[in-house]
Amino acid sequence: MKLSALIFAVFSAATLSFSAVADIRIRDIVDVEGIRENDLVGYGIVVGLNGTGDTVKNSPFTEDSLSYMLERLGVNVQGEEIKPKNVAAVLVTATLPSFARSGSSIDVTVASIGDAKSLEGGTLILTPMKGADNEIYAVAQGSIIVSGIDVQAQGARETRGTPTTGAVPNGARVERELDYDFNQLGQLTLSLRNPDFTTAARIEDAINGEMGQRVAYMRDPGTVELDFALLQDSPARVLANIENLTVPVVTPARIVIDEKSGTIVLGEDVSISRVAIAQGNISIKISETPVASQPNAFGRGETEVLPRSEISIGQTGSGNIAILQPNVTLSELISGLNALGVTPQEMSDIIRSMKTAGAIHAELVIR
C-alpha cells in the first residue's frame, strides 16, 4: 500500500470520542495560601565510613569541624594532626511540613561537599537545621541509607548511582513550631496551580453550592477567595468540607517535545486543520577507493596513491504527499505515523513543521 493511501486509510477510520474534561478534587488543583512547607538546611559531619571519607588535603574544613566537635565533647585535640579517612563533611537538607509540631520527626537528605567517595555505612552526628530566618527548627542525627554503590579494586572501579548522597528516614526531630494560627483567619485564598478562567469559575460555583451561600469569589484565573464572615464553622472545618469537592478541569491543548530523550506528550484537545504532508529520508553515502599508480618496469619514477571518491545521494520512501482531512485529531495522526514506523525524531519534526504552517491549534513546548 502506498504511503498516502495508508495514511489516508488510518486517518479516515472511525474515531473514538475523547473528553479533555476530568473531575478532579479541589485539593489536587489548588494551593491554600498560608499552608506551605519550609526548607531547612544544616552543616554536619558523617562518621563511621570505611575509608571513603574526605581527605585533609582537599577538604581541610572536615578536619576543623571534627576538631571543634571533639573539643565540645571534652576531648583536647589542639596541636594534634588529625587525618581521619572515615569522616566526611556534608550538607543536610529537609522540608518542614505545614503545622509540624514539636517532637515530630521528618526525613532528611545528606550530600557530601568534600571529596568523599561514599557515605555508605556512615552516621550523621547531631546537626542543627536552620530556616531562611537563620533560626534552628530541627535537629538531625542517625544512620545514613545510600542507594548508590562504589566498588574499587586494584585495577578497576565501578560506580552505580550516587554513593555520595543519602537519606536518614525520620532523622530530624522538630524543636520549634511555626507561629501560625490558621483558625484566626477571616479570609482564605486558594491559588490554582494551573490558572484557568473556566476552572476557577467552576471552583467558585462548587464551593458556593456546597455552602449554600456566596462565600467564594473568583478574583482572577489563578485565585479564588473564601470569606469566613458568613460561616459558623472554623476555617479548618470549612476547608475540610470543600477540599474533596470535585470540579471539571479542562486540560489545555498542549504538545510537549523533549528532544534529548525523544519523548512526546500530547494533549487530547489538540485539533488539526486541513494540511498536506510530504516526508522523506535523504541518505548520503561516501566511499573511498584509492588507486595505486606505479611506473613502468624499466622506467624511473615512484609509486603514488591516487584518491578516488564516490558520493551517492538517495531518498528512501515513496515520497508521496498525504492530505489530512479536517477534524482529524492529533492522536489519530500519531497512530497513523506509528503504523508507518516513523521514529520519534521524525515525528517531532513533522509536528513542528505543522505548527509552523498553522495546521496544529495547540501550544507547542520544546525542551
Image: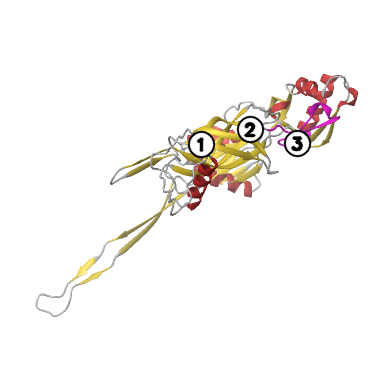
Q: Earlier in the sequence, mark 3 or mark 1?
A: 1
Q: Tell me which label, 1 or 2, sits earlier in the chain.
A: 1
- Position of 161 with respect to 252 (left or right) is left
Residue situated furthest left in the rendering = 298
| Magenta region includes residue 365 | no
Q: CA distance from mark 3 to mark 1?
A: 46 Å
List x then y, in percent, for residue 71: 52, 44
The earlier-in-sequence mark between 2 and 3 is 3
Residue 214 versus residue 63 in the image, above or below: above
Residue 32: quarter of image: top right
- Name the residue nearer the viewer: 146 or 344: 146
State the extent of the magenta-drawn residues as a range: 176-197
For residue 230, which quarter of the picture? top right
- Taking the image as drawn, is residue 318 in sight? yes
Amino acid on which the number 2 mark rests in the picture: Glu
Q: Which residue is mark 3?
A: 196
Residue in front for this viewpoint, 224 or 298: 224
Question: Pointer 2: what residue?
Answer: 268
Q: Is residue 367 above or below residue 10?
A: below
- The residue shown at (50%, 46%) is 67
Mark toward the viewer: 2 or 3: 3
Q: Position of residue 241 (x, y in %)?
A: 77, 20
Residue at x 71% of width, y 34% of height = 36
